[in-house]
């Protein structure tokens, strides 16, 4: 193994293939991020992933700020909980409040009491936990870290840097491409659409940027229009016509020509998607109000409902939720954060079942990093490894993958 490679053992590779995630894998200290090398290996050696009939989608749910997942999934046996309680101090969740789960591979654990929906999905086999996973250049030991001989990721506790490493899937630096974009480059030929297969409901992101596929950004309400140049609004018509002339003006200047193409494609895509969404079926699934992540995932569900009309066989979506940088007020804020996350993911899973694509859509969480096991008095500080969730009908759920710390 070279420093630039990513380690994924065969058992976990099969799990990742089956869940269509192919993005994370585990090890004993802090698991390596399944980078683009690993993804290429999994995809290139698995024709079934590229040639499988029917629709397939990935949904990346990014938890911005660094989710304290050690209060999300908690050891529930006497010895394990005792160690947890000693480590977490005033942030420890009372054992009697834990939502018990029984992983297929053994052990006794519990979800945070605010995550009843995730407990149900885990027990029903539609949710799996990837334990203690994070960015890693190569396997290291605690002794190597303490002796400062370990080869560690750059800027290990920097929000921006670690978000970029997760989204790029490159242990030694983010570069300009994301692993969602690299996957799209490989499978986009299966689509017959004028719209990008990579759709972001959470703004710009590195994850979806490929060599030939670039993300199209919209919001939870739908495609974003260019205000002030709307030709269907009477007082804006003359301005819209002038802008249209500028946009369509032929130019040999590379920047001008490319800018015109981008604006034109954006406007045409917005018009196409707006019309398609207006004819989309009305979902019976109820998404919780006042929950921004749920609103984003509801739009993802609506986009999936029109995927056939738009000519998609493969799609990758990106949504995000902030607020997880819990240096303070963690005991007050984290229950609401985890409740909102759990409810939003559960509603989305229900919507995919309603659309009869629950086995074809796989969602997964990512986050900057984990947090310190010890309390700083009112919260936790930046850590390293953390637990992630993988959800969907194609997931080998009801189990924890990797080694729990």
Image (tube, rainbow, N blue to C red):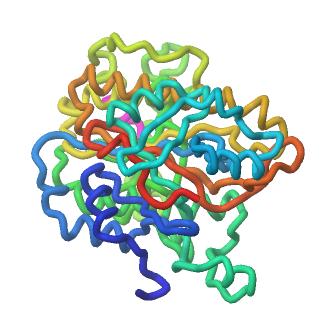
Which residue is located at x 51 percent, y 32 percent? 100
| Position of residue 117 in the picture relative to residue 360 (left or right) | right
Relative height, residue 265 to residue 218 (above, below): below
Q: Which quadrant of the figure has residue 148?
A: bottom right
Residue 349: in magenta span: no
Q: Residue at x 61, y 17 (%)?
A: 290
Residue lying furthest right in this view?
Answer: 377
Q: Quadrant of the C terminus?
A: bottom right
For the point 61% across and 46% down, the residue is 69
Residue 233 appearing in the image:
yes
Q: Residue at x 27, y 20 (%)?
A: 354
Query: Going by the image, does 335 lie left or right of 282?
Result: right
Instruction: Tell me residue 233's x, y (percent).
Output: 48, 15
Q: Is residue 93 above or below residue 60?
A: above
Whole-percent x and y of residue 229?
51, 28
For the residue pair 7 and 28, the one nearer the viewer reads as 28
Range drawn in magenta: 266-273
Q: Position of residue 123 (x, y in %)?
A: 38, 32
Which of the pair 91/3 is nearer the observer? 91
Q: Is residue 105 above or below residue 282?
A: below
Residue 24, by quadrant, is bottom left
Whether 272 is among the magenta residues is: yes
Q: Quadrant of the N terminus?
A: bottom left
Q: How many discs mark residues in the rendered view?
A: 0
**Front-most of residues 163 and 271:** 163
x, y percent for residue 201: 48, 36
Q: Main secondary structure of the magenta part?
A: helix
Along the line of sight, the residue nearer the viewer: 371 or 316:
371
Residue at the front extreme of this rendering: 78
**Viewer can see residue 239:** no
């Amino acid at each position: 193994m070279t420093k630039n490679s990513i380690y994924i053992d065969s058992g976990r590779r099969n799990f990742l293939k089956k869940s269509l995630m192919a993005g994370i894998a585990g090890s004993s200290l802090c698991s390596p991020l399944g980078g683009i090398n690993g993804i290429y290996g999994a995809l290139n050696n698995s024709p079934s992933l590229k040639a499988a009939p029917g629709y397939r989608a990935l949904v990346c749910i990014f938890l911005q700020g660094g989710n304290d997942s050690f209060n999300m999934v908690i050891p529930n046996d006497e010895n394990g909980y005792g160690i947890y309680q000693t480590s977490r101090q005033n942030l420890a969740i009372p054992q009697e409040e834990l939502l018990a789960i029984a992983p297929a591979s053994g052990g006794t654990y519990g979800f945070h009491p605010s995550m009843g929906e995730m407990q149900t999905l885990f027990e029903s086999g539609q949710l799996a936990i990837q334990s203690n996973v994070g960015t890693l250049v190569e396997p290291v030991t605690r002794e190597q870290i303490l002796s400062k001989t370990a080869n560690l990721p750059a800027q290990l506790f920097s929000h921006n840097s670690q978000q970029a490493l997760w989204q790029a899937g490159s242990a030694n630096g983010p570069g300009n491409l994301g692993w969602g974009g690299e996957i799209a480059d490989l499978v986009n030929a299966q689509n017959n659409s004028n719209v990008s297969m990579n759709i972001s409901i959470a703004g710009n992101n590195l994850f979806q940027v490929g060599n030939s596929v670039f993300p199209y950004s919209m919001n939870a309400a739908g495609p974003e229009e260019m205000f002030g140049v709307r030709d269907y609004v009477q007082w804006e018509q003359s301005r819209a016509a002038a802008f249209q002339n500028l946009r369509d003006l032929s130019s040999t200047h590379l920047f001008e020509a490319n800018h015109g193409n981008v604006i034109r494609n954006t406007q045409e895509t917005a018009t196409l998607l707006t019309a398609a969404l207006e004819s989309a079926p009305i979902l019976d699934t109820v998404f919780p109000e006042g929950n921004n992540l749920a609103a984003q995932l509801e739009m993802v569900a609506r986009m999936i409902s029109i995927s056939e009309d738009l000519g998609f066989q493969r799609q990758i979506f990106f949504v995000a939720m902030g607020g997880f940088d819990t240096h303070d007020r963690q005991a007050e804020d984290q229950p609401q954060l985890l409740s909102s996350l759990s409810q939003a993911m559960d509603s989305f899973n229900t919507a995919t079942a309603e659309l009869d694509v629950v086995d074809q859509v796989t969602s997964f969480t990512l986050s900057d990093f984990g947090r310190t096991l010890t309390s700083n008095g009112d919260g936790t500080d930046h850590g390293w490894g953390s637990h992630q969730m993988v959800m969907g009908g194609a997931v080998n759920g009801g189990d924890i993958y990797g080694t729990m710390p």
